[in-house]
Image (tube, helix red, strand yellow):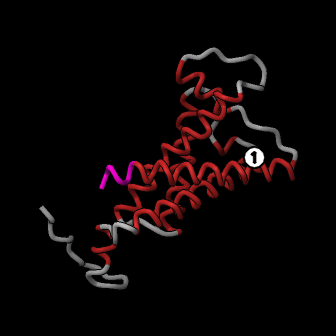
């Protein structure tokens, strides 16, 4: 399962980051919001690269972190889907994972501050884009995982359909 979840997750993450980026570019065109160079600064600090003074950072570095982070996190969503955590509920949970990942890296490197300290508009825009990423990634991850049949969690839930208490675990397969 894990080998399949890995490559499917990379595909799902790539799809999610492309959809998110297209949404960001559309939103920026409508609102006039400039590009963020936070991803570049985070990568520069994580790797010891030299930072440029001022706001703009090298576009290739910015894109490497922006796309790399989204592609790699897709693996987490794929593992969720293979375990049987599929659908919008799971994509909503994954949104929290995506935001948390960003916040750990941004805050640990000193590039960012905790979201409660952000202007509300900035926070809303970030949460919107991370949600778009998470749901787009989830659609692809769920579709790819479904080709393997139901995950263990889904098989467990089908033992006694509906909301039931006291349903024991699935028998071990090995």
| Residue 4 part of the magenta-drawn span | yes
Please, is residue 89 above or below residue 159 in the view?
A: above
Q: Residues within 10 Å of mark 1 (few under 14, many from 20)?
A: few
Residue behind mark 1: 122
Q: Is residue 127 left or right of residue 167?
A: right
| Residue farthest top in this picture | 50
Residue 169 in the figure: left or right of residue 102? left
What kind of element bears circle 1?
helix
Q: Residue at x 66, y 45 (%)?
A: 116
| Above-or-below relation of 144 to 31 | below
The N terminus, quarter of image: bottom left
Q: Position of residue 122 (x, y in %)?
A: 75, 46
Q: Position of residue 21 (x, y in %)?
A: 69, 48
- Would you say 120 lies left or right of 102 here? right
Q: Which residues are magenta?
A: 1-6
The image quarter containing residue 53 is top right
What quarter of the picture does the C terminus occupy? bottom left
Q: Residue at x 60, y 22 (%)?
A: 44
- Residue 150 falls in image quadrant: bottom left
Q: Residue at x 61, y 49 (%)?
A: 17
Closest to the observer, 140 or 115 = 140
Q: Is residue 95 left or right of residue 154?
A: right
Residue 31 locus on image (x, y percent):
86, 50
């Amino acid at each position: 399962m894990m080998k399949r979840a890995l490559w499917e997750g990379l595909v799902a993450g790539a799809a999610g980051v492309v959809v998110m980026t297209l949404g960001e570019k559309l939103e920026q065109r409508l609102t006039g919001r400039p590009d963020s160079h936070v991803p570049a600064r985070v990568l520069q600090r994580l790797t010891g690269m030299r930072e440029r003074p001022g706001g703009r950072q090298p576009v290739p570095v910015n894109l490497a972190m922006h796309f790399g982070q989204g592609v790699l996190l897709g693996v987490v969503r794929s593992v969720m889907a293979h375990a049987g955590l599929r659908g919008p509920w799971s994509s909503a949970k994954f949104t929290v994972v995506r935001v948390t990942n960003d916040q750990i890296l941004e805050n640990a490197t000193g590039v960012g501050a905790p979201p409660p300290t952000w202007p509300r508009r900035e926070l809303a825009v970030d949460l919107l884009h991370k949600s778009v990423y998470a749901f787009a990634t989830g659609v692809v991850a769920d579709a790819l995982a479904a080709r393997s049949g139901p995950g263990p969690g889904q098989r467990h839930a089908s033992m006694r359909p509906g909301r039931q208490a006291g349903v024991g675990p699935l028998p071990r397969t090995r």
